[in-house]
Amino acid sequence: MFGLTLEILFLISLFIIGFFAGILNAVAGGATFLTFPALMLAGLSPVSANATNFIATAPGNIAALPAFKNELRTIGKSIYGPILICSFGSILGAVILFSLGADIFKSLIPYLMGFATLLFIIAPKLRKKFVGLSLSSQKLPIILLFAFSIYGGYFGAGLGQIALAVLILIGFEDLRTANAMKNAVIASISLPASIIYIMSGEVFWPYAIVMLLGSAGGGYAGGRLAISLPQDCIRKIVIIFGALLTLYYFFMK
C-alpha cells in the first residue's frame, strides 16, 4: 500500500515537471533541461530517458501547427524542402543513437548538455546576424539544417532556439512565419524519430504518457503566459540551469 502511494506521488511529480516544462517551452524553450534529468533521476537508463523524453515532449510542436495555419499557407510549397531534409536527418540521428549504443551516449551526455546550453545562449545573436541573408547566397544553411536535424533525432535539447536561427538564415525573416516554420520543422524531426524510438522498445510508457499530459497542459498555459512574462529573465534561468546540469554530468562521469 505504502509503495503504491509512493508510485502515485512520483507520477504526480513527473506530471508537474512536465507541466512546467511545457510552460518553459512556450515561453522561452529548453524543456529538455527539465524533463531529461527528471527521467534520469527516475531510474531510467540514459537511452531510455532520452527516448521517453522525446515521446513526452514531441507532440507539443505538432499540436501548435493549427495556430499557424495562415503563416503555413503563406509559406506554401517552400515548406517541403526543409521538412524533407529534417525528416531524413532525424531518422539518421535516431539510428546513430541506437547504432553507437548506450555507453557512448552516456559518455556524451555532459557534452550534449553543454552544447545545448551554448546553442540556447547564442541562438538569439545568430538570429539577429542572419536576418537579411538569403538562401541563394548561402549554401551553408542547408548543411546546418541537416546537421541540426541529426542532432535533433539523436538528443534534441535546445532545438527550438537553433531552429529559429537556421530558418531565419535560410530566408524566413518574419519572426511569426519563422515560428510557424520552426514548429513544422521540429514536428518533421519528432515524428520519424519517434517511430524509431518506439520500435526500439526503449520508451517507458507510464512516464512518457504522464509527462506528455503535463507538457500539453503546460504548453497551453504557457501560450497565455508568454505575452506577459519577461522572456529574457526566463532565458537566463534556463541557461544557468543548463550550465549547472552540464557541470553535474561532467562530475558524475
Image (cartoon, rainbow, N blue to C red):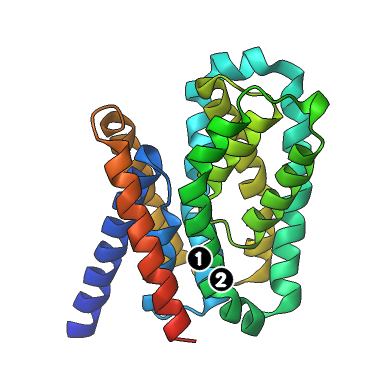
Direction from residue 11 to residue 58 in the image, left or right: right
Q: Position of residue 228 (x, y in %)?
A: 23, 29
Q: Where is residue 167 in the image (x, y as percent from the top left)?
A: 64, 33
Q: Position of residue 152 (x, y in %)?
A: 63, 54
Residue type at numbered disc 1: Gly
**In front here: 106 or 192?**
106
Q: Can residue 183 be seen in this view?
A: no
Mark 1 crowd level (few <14, some 14–19, many ≥20, 10 Å Cα): many
Residue 81, quarter of the rendered image: top right
Q: Is residue 213 visible?
A: yes
Q: Where is residue 73 in the image (x, y as percent from the top left)?
A: 63, 14
Direction from residue 70 to residue 88 in the image, left or right: right
* Residue 111's disc number: 2
Task: Name the residue at the front extreme.
Answer: 129
Instruction: Name the residue at 68% across, 65% down.
Output: 199
Direction from residue 55 to residue 141 in the image, left or right: right
Instruction: Name the residue at 43% across, 85% down.
Output: 251
Q: From the viewer's perspective, is residue 5 above or below residue 79?
A: below
**In front here: 100 or 59?**
100
Residue type at numbered disc 2: Tyr
Q: Under tag 2, what secondary structure?
A: helix
Instruction: Name the residue at 44% across, 65% down.
Output: 36
Residue position marked by numbered label 1 in the rendering: 114
Instruction: Name the residue at 26% across, 35% down.
Output: 230
CB contact under 8 Å: marks 1 and 2? yes
Q: From the viewer's perspective, is residue 181 above or below residue 205?
A: above
